[in-house]
């Protein structure tokens, strides 16, 4: 099962590190970086990260490579993040809420209404003038945040529907990511929030443990949630980033020249991912419609009014407020 396969990979990592004398240390090293991903191999993140790895190998004459482990085989996000911190797994893609649990300042980019569009989000989350010291704030936990990918616009989908206003969610158990803010968001919308790891959602929807979930169209399709929750309400309530995180120690193993290649190819991967995203979203919608999913618009104003108080309430420090305000100022 999964726990066993995680143990096997982690064991193999430990052996590999012993084999080459400890891994961290002399700059100029190399190796295959193990990257934990919770998406399938069809997802734009898998495709863009694989391409990133191939270009990294080419650009460093084979010194560095990336092996992307899809489908949570290295653990769900919470676990993967811990393994990166422990320098056991080299890299992971984790959603904003996971980092919010380590440093609350990340909440600024996880709030409803903070980004107007995916373009706006992408202009902010990889702009050091706005992100400031946020991405180096976890280095004392051995976690370097290297930047972000869009995780699309999130919507609510349910097994019974349609949902057109918050009142329709009354009594419904809706899965959220492991985030206090997102839990409160669903409660304010009138649903009953259930935090859960991504990979468990399909079975929970199927068995009726959940009445619904919220995600982007690409995840809805690639995780096959459409098979068990056929009503998709376009709430567009969140645009949350996914971050690439890496073991700070492992990153320090890279020579300056290899690091420059790494940074350039990661930037290129962000661009490729953003381009793939639109096409993947259109495809997911078309496939879901063909499978009989019912998409509907919602009463935007009532949803907006439900979550608006969350924003003010979350700006609990000068740093969070500044991140939020500079982000909003970049919206125009
Ligand atoms: C999206 C996002 C993931 C996240 C997932 C979730 O797929 O890209 O990073 O884990 O949603 O809802 O858990």
Image (cartoon, rainbow, N blue to C red):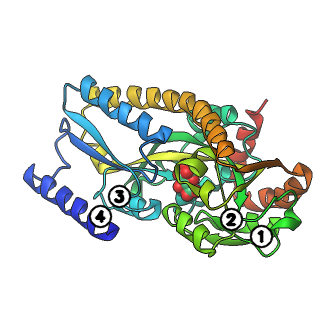
Pointer 2 or 4: first along the chain: 4
Pointer 1 or 4: first along the chain: 4
Residue 64, x across and y down, in percent: 23, 35
Contact between marks 1 and 4 (CB within 8 A): the answer is no
Residue 329 in the image: above or below residue 34:
above
**Image depth: mark 2 or mark 3 in front:** 2
Some atom of ligand 1 lies within 8 Å of the CB belonging to the residue at label 1: no
Q: CA distance from mark 2 to mark 4?
A: 29 Å
Pointer 2 or 3: first along the chain: 3
Contact between marks 1 and 2 (CB within 8 A): the answer is yes
Determine the residue positioned at 41% across, 64% down.
Answer: 79
Name the disc covering residue 321, or none: none
Pointer 1 or 2: first along the chain: 1
Contact between marks 3 and 4 (CB within 8 A): the answer is yes
Report the residue marked by disc 1.
191
Report the residue marked by disc 2.
212
Name the disc covering residue 73, or none: 3
**Image depth: mark 1 or mark 2 in front:** 2
Residue 99 in the image: above or below residue 60:
below
Q: Is residue 319 visible?
A: no
Residue 85, x across and y down, in percent: 36, 59
Report the residue marked by disc 4.
6
Q: CA distance from mark 3 to mark 4?
A: 6 Å
Determine the residue positioned at 27% across, 23% down.
Answer: 59
Secondary-structure class at tag 1: loop
Residue 292, x across and y down, in percent: 69, 49
Residue 195 in the image: above or below residue 109:
below
Q: CA distance from mark 2 to mark 3?
A: 25 Å
């Amino acid at each position: 099962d999964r726990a066993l396969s995680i143990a096997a990979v982690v064991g193999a990592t430990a052996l590999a590190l012993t084999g080459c004398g400890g891994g961290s240390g002399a700059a100029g090293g190399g190796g295959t970086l193990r990257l934990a991903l919770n998406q399938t191999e069809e997802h734009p993140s898998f495709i863009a990260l694989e391409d990133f790895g191939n270009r990294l190998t080419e650009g460093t004459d084979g010194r560095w490579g990336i092996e992307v482990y899809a489908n949570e085989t290295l653990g769900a996000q919470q676990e993967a993040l811990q393994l990166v911190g422990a320098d056991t797994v080299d890299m992971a893609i984790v959603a904003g809420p996971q980092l919010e649990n380590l440093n609350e300042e990340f909440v600024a980019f996880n709030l409803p209404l903070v980004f107007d569009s995916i373009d706006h989000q992408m202009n902010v989350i990889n702009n050091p003038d706005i992100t400031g010291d946020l991405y180096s704030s976890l280095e004392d936990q051995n976690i370097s945040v290297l930047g972000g990918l869009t995780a699309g616009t999130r919507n609510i989908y349910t097994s019974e529907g349609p949902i057109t206003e918050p009142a329709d969610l009354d009594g419904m158990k809706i899965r959220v990511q492991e985030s206090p803010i997102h839990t409160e968001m669903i409660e304010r919308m009138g649903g009953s929030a259930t935090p859960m790891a991504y990979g468990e959602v399909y079975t929970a929807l199927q068995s009726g443990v959940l009445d619904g979930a919220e995600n982007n169209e690409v995840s809805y399709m690639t995780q096959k949630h459409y098979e068990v929750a056929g009503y998709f309400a376009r709430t567009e309530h969140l645009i949350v980033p996914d971050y690439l995180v890496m073991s700070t120690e492992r990153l320090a193993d890279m020579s300056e020249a290899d690091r420059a290649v790494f940074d350039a190819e990661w930037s290129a991967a962000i661009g490729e991912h953003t381009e793939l995203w639109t096409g993947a979203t259109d495809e997911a919608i078309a496939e879901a419609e063909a499978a009989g999913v019912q998409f509907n618009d919602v009463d935007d104003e009532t949803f907006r009014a439900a979550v608006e108080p969350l924003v003010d309430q979350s700006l609990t420090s000068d740093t969070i407020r500044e991140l939020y305000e500079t982000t909003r100022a970049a919206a125009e």
